Amino acid sequence: MDDLFADALRQLLVDQCTPQLVRAIESGGSAEPFWNKLQASGFADALLSEEQGGAGLVLPDVFALFELCGSHAVPVPLAETMLARALLTQAGLEPPPGCITFGLDATSAFSAIHCRLVPYGRVANWVLLAQGDACLLLPVARAEMRPAVFALDADLAWSAAEVDAAPRLAGSHDLRTLQACICAAQLSGALMSVFTRTLQFANERSQFGRPIGKFQAIQHQLSVISEHSFAARMAAQIGCYCGSGTPERLRVAVAKARTSEAALEVAALSHSIHGAIGFTEEFDLQLFTRRLHAWRQTAGSESYWHTVLGEELVDRQSGLALDLIRATSGMN
């Protein structure tokens, strides 16, 4: 089943999510036409039950879809919308039209809310953010927006009136863990794209009469990129491994820590192999390596999630690292 859905989304992204489209949206172009095509395909409702108009998938089933969002540098929050719509439906709320992203680390003053570095804040229609014991669904169109470092992100602020009128999801929802789970899968896809593009470049670029991929130094760098990319992919799969629609925090910690760690190494080595051309705007590599750096920080970098794992290991009565590994990897 996952291959069927993944193949369908892959073909859609190959046809529609071209580097030219990504550049156009990053440069200020409208993301609405592209989002409308994604929404019409039904993938945004993949985690809803069939009775609710979805595909009835669970989190492990959609790992491949999240990964494809990274490997094609999808410039809209498709993965976030899948999880957000599932949360809203479970809470008995009707998901609004348009794409939804998550907001973390929001601050409030006099009932107004300011949320920094909202992923996809410039192109999303809605932001789901945690406030106290509830989550608020806030419209981006009614927010004060300031640009962030990454082209698609933004700092957003809502007035007290907008906050009071926002729909609320009762109960505790760990949006940071949800966002980290998504980012780990997207990092996995972006890492594999960087690896395949770098390998192709090394085999095509010639110096001193032969492809640079024939030189031992380049082969060593490629092997390190490969090691990080495939290890990160396995960790990202662990992050989505659960029996329900809610990822487990410890497994997500493993996934996000390993993929964020790999992002730094792979980005540096790939640009080293490409030389100066890899940094240029017209070369596609930077579309993916910029995302490696952005997603590495989103929902916490490797140091944040290493701390989560370290605290869990210290708090366990047995104190055995092997027990923690078994718990997070699903080993008996």
Image (spheres, helix red, strand yellow):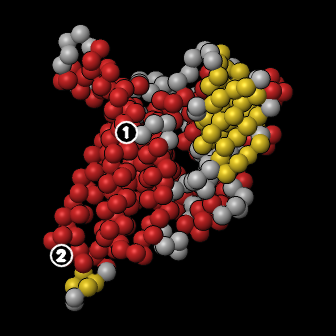
Kindly identify the residue that appears in the image at 19 percent across and 76 percent down.
214
Decide: is 122 above or below 284.
above
- Quadrant including the N terminus: top left
SS for callout 1:
helix
Decide: is 268 above or below 35.
below
Camera-side residue of 157 and 63: 157
Judged from this view, the residue extending furthest toward the right is 161
Camera-side residue of 210 and 295: 295
Kindly identify the residue that appears in the image at 63 percent across and 18 percent down.
132
For the image shown, how many numbered marks are present on the structure? 2
For mark 2, does the 10 Å Cα neighbourhood hold few (<14), some (14 to 19), or many (20 or more) residues? few
Judged from this view, the residue extending furthest toward the front is 109
- Quadrant including the C terminus: top left
Pointers 1 and 2 in contact (C-beta within 8 Å):
no
* Amino acid type of the residue tagged 2 in the rendering: Phe
Q: Earlier in the sequence, mark 1 or mark 2?
A: 2
Q: Where is residue 116, by image quadrant?
A: top right
Q: Identify residue for label 1.
A: 302
For mark 1, does the 10 Å Cα neighbourhood hold few (<14), some (14 to 19), or many (20 or more) residues? many
CA distance separating discs 1 and 2: 32 Å
SS for callout 2:
loop
Camera-side residue of 222 and 234: 222
Decide: is 191 above or below 178.
below
Instruction: Measuring from the top left, give residue 210's x and y in whole percent.
Output: 22, 85
Instruction: Measuring from the top left, give residue 109's x and y in whole percent.
Output: 73, 25
Instruction: Measuring from the top left, give residue 188's x and y in whole percent.
Output: 39, 48
Kindly identify the residue that appears in the image at 55 percent across and 66 percent down.
19
Can residue 70 be seen from the camera position used here?
no
* Amino acid type of the residue tagged 1 in the rendering: Glu
Q: Identify residue for label 2.
A: 215
